[in-house]
């Protein structure tokens, strides 16, 4: 919005020409997001406390988390507000990359909000806190994936084919479906990525500041990729594919980074508020959408390595438990679990790590994954 307001004024004030640069608008979006989080955060936290929107502690979490049942949830509203406002202020509103990513984030955030609200209402009514029925939640996520996949396939956002992707460490490696049948396969692939990423972030959101910090790291990493891929000179120098107009995603990713850092002000241990499904599904959907739009779906495995490990721990724990229960009985299966508790962060808690230690060390691993992902820009 500010882009369109300030550009016409450049003939009177030459300093306004700076808004033409994506780097400036990305930095401005991050700062704006941080300030918005600081402004709206206390208001939202007080409102959640007044409404008694308390955290529903997941079944199977360590006993040390029982006290968190009085901490308000749905703090993802802070993240959504602090992302949407800066994005609309600093991004070019005719850019389909940024608008697609923003719409996916809002849609996923809406699903999470409904889930959090239903858990709160069920808790007040004395019912089991199941929230939104799992199949309905999954249906909402799949709908977003199908919509994004079909749109990207049928209405390519750049000169590259819509239904295509790349592989890390390979130059110009585009997998392009040549038939309509393979095109629908690509749509299914996009749906899987978007659904999987949103659920992965949701599973990781179990400790104070863990998911917010990791999402900030991932968003900053994707901001670099969007900037490089959206410029002819840098993409040519690094010998990677060029995505015209994709640079605007840098602003969206920077806004997410600022929003997550601002949210950490309230979510750092001991947390004043939790993001809930409102925030985790929104952030996961946003990161998944950015990876899809940048044709870097497989890169997401590197950037979000910690998210992948958390999800894999849950899948492995459940699969092995079911197998051993079927072969040796329930008592044997319980006594011989792969992890003391899943997701992975709870396993390390039960091994004696303090919560702050787990979070800090997982952040360090997230930074390591980000650096490893950035090496793919040159190691091709």
Image: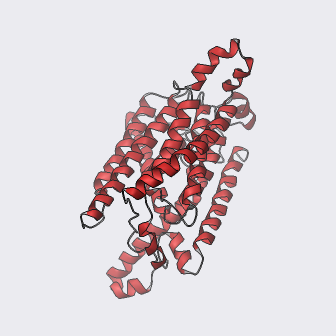
Judged left or right of residue 333, residue 300 is right
Residue pictured at 53% horizontal, 80% vertical:
350
Decide if residue 270 is on the left or right side of residue 44. right
Q: Disc count in the image?
A: 0
Q: Is residue 46 above or below residue 186?
A: below
The residue lying toward the viewer, choosing from 270 and 295, is: 270
Q: In which quadrant will I find the C terminus?
A: top right
Query: From the viewer's perspective, is residue 343 above or below residue 165?
Result: below
Position of residue 207 measured from the top left corner of the image (x, y, whole percent) = 52, 66
Horizontal side of 217 relative to 70 (left or right) equals right
Q: Quadrant of residue 86?
A: top right
Residue at image position (27%, 67%) is: 128
Residue at 54% x, 58% y: name it.
Answer: 211
The answer to whether residue 7 is visible is yes
Q: Nearer the viewer, residue 336 or 135?
A: 135
Q: Confirm whether residue 75 shows in the render.
A: no
Q: Quick one: 238 or 178, which is closer to the camera?
A: 238
Residue 264: quarter of image: bottom right
Quarter where residue 134 is shown: bottom left
Position in image of residue 48 (x %, y %): 41, 55
Which residue is the extreme one toward the top?
Answer: 11
Q: Residue at 42% of width from left, 67% of height from top?
A: 70
């Amino acid at each position: 919005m500010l882009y369109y307001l300030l550009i016409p004024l450049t003939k009177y004030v030459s300093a306004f020409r700076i808004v033409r640069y994506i780097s400036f608008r990305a930095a401005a979006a991050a700062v704006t997001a941080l300030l918005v989080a600081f402004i709206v955060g206390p208001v939202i936290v007080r409102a959640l406390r007044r409404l008694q929107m308390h955290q529903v502690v997941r079944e199977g979490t360590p006993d040390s988390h029982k006290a968190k049942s009085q901490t308000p949830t749905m703090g993802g509203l802070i993240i959504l507000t602090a992302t949407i406002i800066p994005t609309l202020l600093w991004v070019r509103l005719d850019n389909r990359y940024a608008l697609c990513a923003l719409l996916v984030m809002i849609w996923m955030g809406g699903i999470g909000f409904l889930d959090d609200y239903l858990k709160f209402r069920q808790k007040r009514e004395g019912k089991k806190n199941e929230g939104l029925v799992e199949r309905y939640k999954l249906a909402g996520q799949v709908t977003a994936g199908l919509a994004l996949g079909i749109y990207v396939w049928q209405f390519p956002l750049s000169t590259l084919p819509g239904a295509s992707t790349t592989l890390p460490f390979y130059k110009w490696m585009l997998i392009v479906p040549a038939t309509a049948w393979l095109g629908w396969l690509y749509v299914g692939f996009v749906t899987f990525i978007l659904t999987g990423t949103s659920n992965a972030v949701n599973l990781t959101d179990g400790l104070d500041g863990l998911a917010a910090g990791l999402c900030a790291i991932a968003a900053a990493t994707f901001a670099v990729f969007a900037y490089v891929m959206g410029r002819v000179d840098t993409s040519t120098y690094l010998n990677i594919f060029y995505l015209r107009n994709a640079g605007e995603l840098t602003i969206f990713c920077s806004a997410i980074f600022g929003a997550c850092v601002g949210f950490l002000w309230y979510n750092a241990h001991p947390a004043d508020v939790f993001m809930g499904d409102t925030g985790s599904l929104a952030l996961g959907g946003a990161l998944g959408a950015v990876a899809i739009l940048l044709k870097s779906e497989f890169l997401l495995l590197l950037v979000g390595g910690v998210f992948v490990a958390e999800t894999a721990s849950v899948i492995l724990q459940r699969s092995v438990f079911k197998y051993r229960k079927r072969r040796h009985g329930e008592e044997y299966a319980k006594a011989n679990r792969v992890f003391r508790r899943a997701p992975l962060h709870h396993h390390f808690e039960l091994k004696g790590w303090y919560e702050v230690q787990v979070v800090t060390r997982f952040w360090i691993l997230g930074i390591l994954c980000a650096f490893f992902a950035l090496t793919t820009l040159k190691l091709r």
